Image (spheres, rainbow, N blue to C red):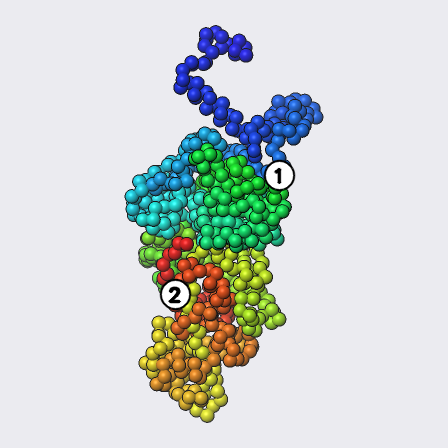
């Protein structure tokens, strides 16, 4: 071969007989051999790659067999009971590389990633040894810069000292946001750093690590959980309708894996460090599929497994004494499990391919405007969206500005507006959106821009296009009895639907890893019967207490209400028959229009109740719970409890915060006090307002505004 290549003429066999050269050559050979590792053995030839190479080599031969020369036995293949991921990882990484090369060809640069690390990560303590044993620089999670270079990506590693402050870290993230396609902030961050602020500073369109996946629905999934699901799909592990136990609930692996498995139709149970060994053994023994994500060697024993179960080992720990990588399962898995993923060689090889796949997709999306405004007429400038609207008259510009202001109040995101009058040429209304706190464009800016375009468009948004036929037989006249027995339908951020037979049994696992904020406002008996003079009794319903404390005296406050009569005048005095208290109309705001069959139209008023009682006491003695009009039934005494949540405290709402009606004391206990916070938000009756306008833009919207802290589990 040397002679054919003419190497002899150089009088050089390309071998340098030095210790460093021999070490480098040994490393290269070692890397090459590791590329043949699949499942539990070295020397495995990929049938897929062999076939492609054979087709290339024999391309001029008719009816060439792609398996020509391949060992026909399974002697050199891993056992069929191993759910191995090595070759799958190589294929996925190759796909990501091809995408990166096409991107560079199209845009003149490589897809880019910034990896931010603060301090020393404990699980990286043995990274060098793990690379030596199990991976190569071209595909190692512990060598992202080298792996990026080998596969067509620019990877910048930002390593900050342990003592870095939150503001200093945020400053680094802000600097990166305009310079890279993807950002990965390595978890965990030191306790001294406000992790929620830092992770929230990573834009959704650059969240290639999927940190927003469970909360905001990032389009790029968390890499290790996504790799887990790829392995499950590749080996046809059946999870739909199966009982799957996930051991571990970390926000970067366990919780997202459980989330993805539920979306795949599995019945998921999550165990964690707070579960005692006896309970865990019972749960493992009942599961069809066990997914271990704890990173705690021996936390699950193989003898606990149900015969024929399938095991996905995700959590791993390097044992320095034994110089080996350990799974969470201790013992002979093969004696109980039908199939299982080995360690190493299971999920591990899939993490870096999934990361680079996300980076490549993020790069394409950002260059092609996937994350941007739906209307290219909005100019995207640094940290700002800007657009100019032209009107024939100053009045029409002001009317449009008023509609935008009303929309902005509902969305809680206001535009900067500037009117430029050009005399006979009309008026230009210039509009800008930006997020001051984020110091960059956010999803909220794009959503607001789309809303403005909807307001401005000439074509009406037909309300009838969004209607549906809600049959009376499909309407539950009362909340589920017993509480918590209702069925649950879940639609995820991608439109996929899951069904659960019983709310109380399913919602704890769906909320795994979440911090839940409940509205603890109690529903008042806000519906009264009143009469004017000798006239007949009519309905009076309080519409919104706003910031009025129900514990204050009735006579001290004017309250917005609806009186079911079209002939209400300012100064009218109605009487509540049971107490004899007078109700004075101090203002009339307009007509309260109702749909057919809802009891007739009324008047939107402001009233004062002349009673010495406080508001809550007066209503409790004389009123009833406001029942939604579409139920077409009268209130009954049991509604007081049925339409209040088990955690309700002080009164103030005039409509039930119905989402909470399904929660039971047992569910709250299972969620745990540390995972629950409450706030008091008085719900008004704006949701009772019927939809009467033809154009959706003309329907008066109802909004509630409040501020709550950010919680991290």
Residue that protrudes farthest toward the bottom in the picture: 534
Q: Which mark is residue 81?
A: 1
Is the residue 536 above or below the residue 508 in the image?
below
Point 53% across, 66% down: residue: 484
**Residue 153 seen in render:** no
Provide residue 594's location: percent of width, then percent of height: 50, 75
Alpha-carbon neighbours of circle 2 within 10 Å: few (<14), some, or many (≥20)?
few
Q: Are marks 1 and 2 in contact (CB under 8 Å)?
A: no
Between the residue at mark 1 and the residue at mark 2, the CA separation in whole angstroms equals: 52 Å
Is the residue 510 above or below the residue 638 in the image?
above
Q: Quadrant of residue 91?
A: top right
Q: How many marks?
A: 2
Q: Which mark is residue 682?
A: none
Q: Which residue is mark 2?
A: 679
Secondary structure type for disc 2? strand
Point 35% across, 57% down: residue: 415
**In front of the other: 564 or 555:** 555
Residue that protrudes farthest toward the right in the picture: 63
Q: Nearer the viewer, mark 1 or mark 2?
A: 1
Alpha-carbon neighbours of circle 1 within 10 Å: few (<14), some, or many (≥20)?
some
Is the residue 309 above or below the residue 590 in the image?
above
Point 62% across, 71% down: residue: 473
């Amino acid at each position: 071969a040397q002679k054919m290549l003419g190497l002899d003429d150089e009088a050089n066999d390309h071998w340098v007989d030095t210790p460093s050269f021999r070490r480098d050559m040994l490393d290269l050979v070692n890397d090459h051999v590791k590329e043949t590792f699949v499942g539990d053995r070295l020397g495995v030839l990929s049938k897929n790659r062999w076939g492609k190479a054979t087709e290339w080599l024999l391309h001029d031969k008719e009816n060439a067999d792609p398996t020509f020369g391949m060992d026909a036995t399974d002697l050199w293949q891993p056992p069929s009971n191993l759910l191995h991921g090595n070759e799958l990882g190589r294929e996925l990484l190759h796909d990501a590389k091809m995408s990166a090369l096409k991107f560079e060809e199209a845009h003149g640069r490589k897809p880019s990633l910034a990896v931010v690390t603060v301090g020393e990560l404990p699980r990286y303590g043995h990274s060098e040894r793990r690379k030596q044993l199990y991976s190569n620089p071209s595909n190692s999670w512990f060598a992202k810069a080298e792996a990026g270079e080998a596969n067509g990506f620019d990877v910048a590693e930002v390593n900050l000292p342990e003592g870095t402050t939150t503001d200093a870290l945020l400053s680094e993230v802000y600097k990166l946001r305009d310079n890279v396609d993807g950002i990965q902030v390595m978890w965990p961050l030191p306790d001294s750093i406000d992790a929620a602020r830092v992770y929230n500073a990573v834009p959704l369109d650059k969240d290639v690590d999927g940190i927003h996946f469970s909360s905001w629905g990032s389009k790029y999934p968390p890499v290790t959980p996504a790799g887990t699901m790829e392995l499950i799909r590749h080996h046809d592990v059946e999870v739909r309708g199966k009982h799957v136990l996930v051991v571990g609930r970390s926000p970067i692996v366990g919780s997202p894996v459980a989330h993805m498995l539920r979306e795949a139709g599995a019945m998921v149970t999550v165990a964690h460090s707070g579960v005692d060994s006896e309970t865990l053994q019972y749960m493992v023994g009942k599961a069809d599929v066990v997914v271990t994500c704890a990173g705690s060697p021996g936390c699950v024993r193989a003898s606990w497994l149900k015969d024929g179960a399938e095991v996905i080992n995700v959590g791993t720990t390097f044992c320095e004494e034994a110089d080996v990588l350990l799974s969470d399962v201790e013992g002979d898995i093969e004696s109980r499990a039908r199939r299982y993923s080995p360690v190493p060689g299971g999920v591990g090889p899939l993490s870096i391919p999934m990361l680079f796949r996300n980076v490549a997709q993020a790069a394409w999306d950002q260059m092609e405007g996937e994350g941007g405004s739906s209307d290219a007429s909005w100019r995207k400038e640094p940290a700002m969206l800007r657009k100019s609207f032209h009107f024939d008259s100053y009045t029409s510009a002001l009317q449009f500005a008023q509609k935008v202001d009303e929309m902005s109040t509902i969305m809680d995101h206001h535009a900067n507006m500037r009117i430029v009058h050009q005399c006979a040429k009309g008026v230009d209304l210039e509009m800008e959106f930006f997020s001051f706190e984020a110091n960059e464009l956010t999803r909220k800016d794009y959503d607001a821009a789309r809303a403005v375009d909807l307001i401005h468009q000439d074509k009406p948004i037909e309300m009838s296009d969004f209607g549906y036929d809600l049959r009376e037989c499909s309407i539950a006249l009362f909340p589920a009895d017993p509480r918590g027995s209702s069925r649950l339908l879940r639609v995820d951020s991608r439109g996929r639907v899951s069904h659960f037979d019983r709310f109380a049994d399913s919602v704890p696992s769906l909320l795994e890893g979440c911090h839940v904020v409940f509205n603890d406002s109690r529903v008042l008996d806000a519906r009264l019967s009143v009469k004017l003079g000798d006239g007949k009794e009519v309905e009076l319903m309080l519409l919104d207490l706003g910031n009025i404390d129900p514990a204050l005296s009735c006579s001290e406050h004017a309250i917005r209400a609806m009186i079911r009569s079209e002939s209400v005048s300012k100064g009218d005095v109605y009487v509540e028959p049971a107490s004899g208290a007078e109700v004075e109309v101090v203002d009339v705001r307009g007509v309260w229009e109702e749909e057919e069959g809802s009891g007739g139209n009324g008047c939107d008023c402001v009233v004062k109740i002349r009673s010495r009682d406080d508001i809550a006491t007066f209503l409790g003695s004389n009123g009833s719970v406001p029942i939604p009009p579409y139920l077409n039934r009268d209130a009954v005494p049991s509604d007081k409890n049925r339409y209040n949540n088990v955690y309700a405290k002080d009164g103030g709402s005039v409509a039930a915060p119905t989402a909470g009606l399904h929660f039971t004391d047992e569910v709250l206990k299972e969620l745990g006090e540390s995972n629950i916070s409450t706030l008091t938000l008085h719900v008004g009756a704006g949701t009772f307002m019927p939809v009467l306008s033809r154009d959706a833009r003309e329907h008066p919207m109802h909004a509630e505004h409040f501020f709550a802290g950010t919680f991290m589990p």
